[in-house]
Amino acid sequence: MAEQEGKQALMIQLPWTVPQQENTQAVILQQPNRQKVYLDLNHSTDTTAIWSFVIAMIVALILGISATIIAIWYGRKSFDLTKQSFEAVIKQIKSSEDLMASSNRELIESQENLKRMDIANERCNSIRSVAAEFISLCEHLMYEAKNLQNNLIGTLPIDYLAELTQKRDLLEINGTRLELYLGKSDLSASILMLKRGLIREITPSLKREKHDVDVSYWQDEIRNFKLNLTDYFEEELPNKRKGE
């Protein structure tokens, strides 16, 4: 024991003593032909660790790049979908606005047409009413003028004269109203002729003056006026309802 400690002390004190080397491990594999193969385990372990680290870094890099690409793709896809959804909403709003504007326009046109038709119908009814009274007065004064010419003897009652005078004035008033309703037309000329002609026929009879009254002539004129008035209602008034 003392001898071994002396050897160790001698090794430490000698300047040529070789420093202690690191322990290395080696495995000896014996092949069937009894050849020995030495494997350096430390070198193999270091190389495996390095390659494992490199592979892990490569895999991590690939995964990171893939995740980034997928994130970018989903982001663009989401943006495109959002943009398409926004454009669809804009189109729907615009379509709704166009539909509403079209509906409002049609409603306004419909209201204008109804208003125009109401005015035309009111005008038509007024013309019918005035024309019917005018024709009735024409026929009445025509027959009264003929009767008076057949009975010129004697004095006419005051009430009778007042009634005929009133009807003559109403004939002129209604004739003027019809002329204003119909404007410049063939009917207006017929109204003026009937109005002036029948007033000229009845006036001498009221004065008890001799005058020839041609009833058949006035009957034909009144009949023609009725036919022309019917044609006017069938042709002119529908156009006025349409605003033409």
Image: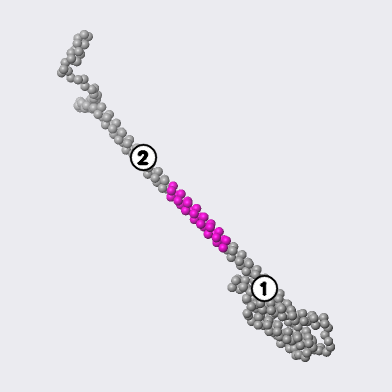
How many marks can you see? Answer: 2
Residue 207 location (% of width, % of height): 78, 87
Q: Which of the two discs, 1 and 2, sits closer to the camera?
A: 1
Within 10 Å of the Cα at label 2, are there few (<14), some (14-19), or many (20+) other Cα atoms? few
* Amino acid under disc 2: Gly
Q: Is residue 37 magenta?
A: no
Q: Farthest top residue?
A: 2
Regarding residue 186, the answer to whether it shows in the image is yes
Q: Image point 72% across, 80% down: which residue?
A: 172
Q: Image point 41% across, 48% down: which residue?
A: 76
Which residue in the protein does label 2 denote? 64
What is the secondary structure assignment of the residue under circle 1? helix
Principal secondary structure, stretch drawn in magenta: helix
* Quadrant in the rendering for residue 55: top left
Alpha carbon distance from label 1 to label 2: 87 Å
* Amino acid under disc 1: Cys
Q: How is the image coloured?
A: one colour
Residue 170 location (% of width, % of height): 74, 79
- Front position in the image: 117 or 210: 210
Q: Image point 25% across, 29% down: which residue?
A: 43
Q: Which residues are magenta?
A: 78-105
Query: Residue 124, which numbered label?
Result: 1
Q: Farthest left residue?
A: 16
- Front position in the image: 91 or 47: 91
Q: Is 87 placed above or below 183 here?
A: above
> Is residue 29 left or right of 139 when viewed as pictured?
left
Q: Image point 19% across, 15% down: which residue?
A: 12
What is the secondary structure assignment of the residue under circle 2? helix
Screen quadrant of the N terminus: top left
Q: Are marks 1 and 2 in contact (CB under 8 Å)?
A: no
> Is residue 166 left or right of 75 when viewed as pictured?
right
